[in-house]
Amino acid sequence: MDAITAQTTTLWDAVQAALLHIAQLAVAYSFSVLGAVILLIAGYVVAGVVERWAYAAMGRVSGFDETLRQFFSKAVRYAVLVFVGVTVLAQFGVQTASIIAALGAAGLAIGLALQGTLQNIAAGIMILVLRPFRVGEFIAADSVSGGVQEVGLFATELKTFDGIYVLVPNSQLWNTAVTNYSRNPTRSTDISTGIAYENDLELAIETIRDLLQADERVLPEPAPNVFVSELADSAVVLTARYWTSSDNWFDTKLHSRKAIKAALEDKGISIPFPQREVRVVGGAAGPLTPPRSKSRPAAS
């Protein structure tokens, strides 16, 4: 009986010691838990405030792209949240140095796995910062061309002349020469027209020059110029060079081609077809007859 009583007393003492230890841990960690909750709430609020502040600050920079504003403001927000998370773990005695090392290794692994995607993101950031083209402009790069519909972090959307949707990775646009047909406000145009050698050359030049000067879409400065660009086999080639706004470039060129032909015809100036003069040397030429085909001997 004494042995049973002794065992019961020992067990009860152990239970009391365990409960006391649990109570001490609860008291000790309750402050840590409370501090962690407060830190998470405060960090979440601060992250939102910093995000809005960064977004507004970048908006005050002239020409800063909307996509970059959203990207960098979100990056700042997540950076604050990561810092808060590491601080909360430190409240519970976790070694944050090992966590930061693990996050760095994970980031390196993800970066190697998504190398192509990260190249597109880096190229997208450079395109949005340097702005070689903007939405609404017409560009040509490598084997693609079209009007810019949207510039994103990963790819750029184009629309061709015939309405086809083209999605081009940003790395492809960044690593090649880009021709922007809409960036400059004015563009020059050359229109070549051939006239016959017997036509009045000065009359043809004056007719084309007067036609271009009368067009309101053609800029007076630099003044339109018409000159002989080639003495071809069948025609004297005249080239009309003029400047117009980039918005009116295409329509003006289409109209000018048709108007030049009509104006030259009204002045009696002809646009000749290609001609070849054939001379026979060493006697009169007889009628051309097709060669006779040689008959093959019959098989025996």
Image (spheres, rainbow, N blue to C red):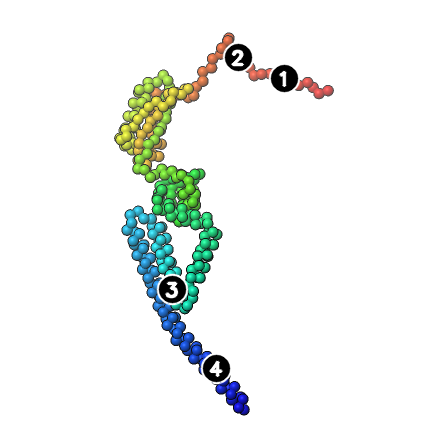
Amino acid type of disc 1? Lys
Query: Element type at marker 2?
Result: loop
Q: Nearer the viewer, residue 213 or 67?
A: 67
Mark earlier in primary sequence (3, 2):
3
Q: Earlier in the sequence, mark 4 or mark 2?
A: 4
Q: Residue 180 versus residue 61: which sits nearer the camera?
A: 61
Q: Quadrant of residue 247?
A: top left
> Which residue lies under the disc numbered 2?
287
The location of residue 229, given as percent across then percent down, is 36, 23
Judging by the rendered image, the residue that carries numbered circle 4 is 14
Residue neighbourhood size for the residue with mark 1, other residues' Cα within 10 Å, grouped as few (<14), some (14–19), many (≥20): few
Please rate how many residues cluster around mark 2, counting C-alpha atoms within 10 Å: few if below 14, some from 14 to 19, many from 20: few
- Rendered residue at 33%/27% (across/down): 240
Q: CA distance from mark 4 to mark 2?
A: 131 Å
Task: Kindly identify the amino acid type of the residue bearing the numbered disc 2.
Answer: Pro
- Amino acid carrying mark 3 in the image: Thr
Element marked by disc 1: loop
Please name the residue that numbered disc 1 is placed on.
Answer: 294
Determine the CA span between mark 3 and mark 2: 104 Å
Nearer to us: label 2 or label 1: 1
